[in-house]
Amino acid sequence: MACNYWIQPQQAPLVYVAPGLSSHRLSPQILAQAESLYNNGFSVVATTGVFHPEFMENASTSQLPAYPPTDCHDLLVEYTEFDRQLEKMFPGRLGKRALVGLSMGGYQALFIAAGENKSSTDLIRFDRYVAINSPVDLHYGVKVVDSFYNAPLKWSDQDRQYRINNTLHKGAKLIGAPPIPNSTPPFDAIESKYIVGLSFQLTLRDTIFSSQSRNDMGVLKTPLSNWNREKCYQEIFELLVP
């Protein structure tokens, strides 16, 4: 398993960043958080979310993610290994440890904090925990985010496909585009909900594909292949959006 780190030239507190649902350690949101922390004097370690294939295939001990006790234990094991390696690489430069979680990572940070006294003494202990935009009720949160995919149903039948295509085109145009200071994304409420819902569906698609590639539970009828995923992805979407 890999991480990205930015270590201050002098001793400084070390912050581990736990990302959202399926974020990669190099996603823009994580890099922005890491940059802000580093510019404020902290050393930073960026990690990958438990629903991302990178974590599932290299650090997860479960067949499927989403069970907090297992996911959080796997995260602690991962953080502990990172910490040991960084101590060897930067002796005397790592101060107190903190865990900052974003969204689902915030929930996991709180879960780890709540179970700190029960965890193995061989695993890393954090001096501070910070949860940002953490969900309060996972079941409710999933239902709401999942419902966003159907937000375009509020558009008329005649305009719906055109407006969906236009939303996706605008999103694609923004990918890789330089940020404009003090600007807001060019999406209305329905478009924004749809993009969030679609992102969630894609996350579930990749999670199902990755999990079944490692541990085939017979859920999918389409043969699993990393070289040609189109038919398998189509079957997964039919399961997610009947």
Image (cartoon, grey):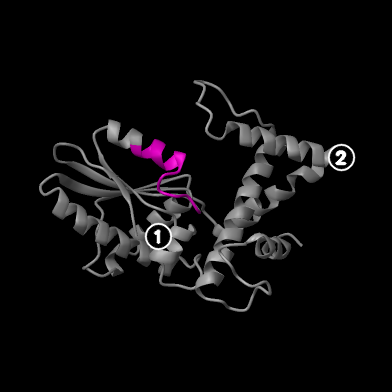
Q: In the image, what residue occupies the spot 37% across and 51% down? A: 47
Q: Is residue 143 above or below residue 93?
A: below
Closer to the camera, 97 or 181?
181
Mark 2: which secondary structure? Answer: loop
Q: Measure the alpha-carbon separation of dots 1 and 2.
A: 43 Å
Residue of label 1: 111
Residue of label 2: 156
Q: In which image quadrant can residue 229 be found?
A: bottom right
Is residue 37 found left or right of 175 in the rendered image? left
Which residues are the magenta region?
22-34
| Circle 2 Cα neighbour tier, 10 Å, few/some/many (<14 / 14–19 / ≥20) | few
- Indicate the quadrant containing the N terminus: top left, top right, bottom left or bottom right: bottom left
Is residue 62 found left or right of 231 in the rendered image? left
Say which amino acid is labelled 2: Ser
Give the percent coordinates (x, y) of residue 185.
60, 29
| Residue 50 is covered by the magenta coloring | no
Closer to the camera, 2 or 204?
2
Q: How many marks?
A: 2
Give the percent coordinates (x, y) of residue 137.
54, 57
Q: Nearer the observer, disc 1 or disc 2?
A: 2
Give the percent coordinates (x, y) of residue 188.
69, 32
Is residue 88 found left or right of 100 in the rendered image? left
Residue 219: assigned label: none
Of label 1 and label 2, which has the lower sequence position? 1
Q: In the image, what residue occupies the spot 28% across and 48% down? A: 98
Q: Is residue 17 above or below residue 221?
A: above
Q: Is residue 227 visible?
A: yes
Say which amino acid is labelled 1: Phe
Q: In which image quadrant can residue 121 be found?
A: bottom left
- Indicate the quadrant containing the C terminus: top left, top right, bottom left or bottom right: bottom right
Residue lying at the far bottom in this picture: please name it.
218
